[in-house]
Amino acid sequence: MGSRDDIVRQLESKVAVLEKQVTFLLKVNGFHLSEMRKISDENLLRLYQDAVHLVAVVRKGIALEVVERWAEIFLQLSEVEMVRLQPIIGFDHTWEPFYLLCTKMLTQVRESKEVKTQVRVQQLFALLEKGRQGLQSCGVMMCHRFQDTLTDTGRTLIEVGDLINQLPD
């Protein structure tokens, strides 16, 4: 048996792990508060522009820290933010760059060697997948609402139902 100090350290370690797991579960299940509802139009536009830029330039991967930050953003984006972006950008299908970026990041994480051994990477994959599902649902709603301006990506989403296997690398 260990000393009292050893037992306290073990319990502190277990509590720290449990706190991280609870935070993760709250995020995945959508029980965290969305910061996107409070974000300014200027910052929302900046996020959109960053997503467009990253989709265009990312070929060899993105640092895990950047992917983690985007995973949290993807979880918080909804049709509300996409509709807010429409008049700013002049484009009905504002969900597309976010969805495309999320799928690229999801593919990168899924193909990483660490996904089989590191809990952090496995949790990141789960967050990205949850974010992708939310963005896909948002995309479906937007495609139905704005059928007059449907893009090829939107058309594929409506016809196939899931773009994850349809997108080019």
Image (cartoon, rainbow, N blue to C red):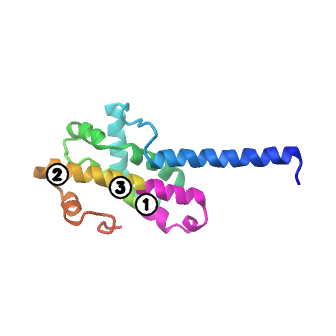
Q: Earlier in the sequence, mark 3 or mark 1?
A: 1
Q: Mark 2 or 1 closer to N-term?
A: 1
At x 16% / y 47%, what residue is drawn? 145
Question: Which corner quadrant holds the C terminus?
Answer: bottom left
Could you say which disc has been placed on residue 144 in the image?
2
Q: Which residue shows up at 28% across the image and 39% down it?
A: 80
Q: Does the magenta segment cover residue 124? A: yes
Q: Is residue 62 visible?
A: no
Name the amino acid type tagged 2: His
Q: Which mark is residue 133?
A: 3
Q: Quadrant of residue 152?
A: bottom left
Circle 1: residue type: Leu
Could you tell me which secondary element the residue under label 3 belongs to? helix
Q: Amino acid at mark 3?
A: Gln
Taking the view exactly as shown, the residue that stands out farthest to the front is: 1
Residue 14 lies left or right of residue 8; in this view the side is left
Vertical arrangement, residue 140 with respect to residue 112, above or below: above
Please name whichever residue, 29 or 147, is drawn nearer the observer in this view of the structure. 29
Task: Confirm whether residue 71 shows in the render.
Answer: yes
Residue that numbered label 1 is attached to: 106
Magenta span: predominant SS is helix
The magenta segment is: 105-129
Dot 3 crowding, Cα within 10 Å, few <14, some 14–19, many 20+: some
Disc 2 crowd rating (10 Å Cα; few below 14, some 14-19, many 20+) is few
Residue 118 among magenta residues = yes
Q: Residues within 10 Å of mark 1 (few under 14, many from 20)?
A: many
Q: Quadrant of residue 128?
A: bottom left
Residue at image position (39%, 52%) is 131
Residue 116: numbered disc: none
* Residue under the point 31% across and 32% down: 41
Circles 2 and 1, Cβ within 8 Å, touching? The answer is: no
Q: Residue 27, image x and y in percent? A: 48, 46
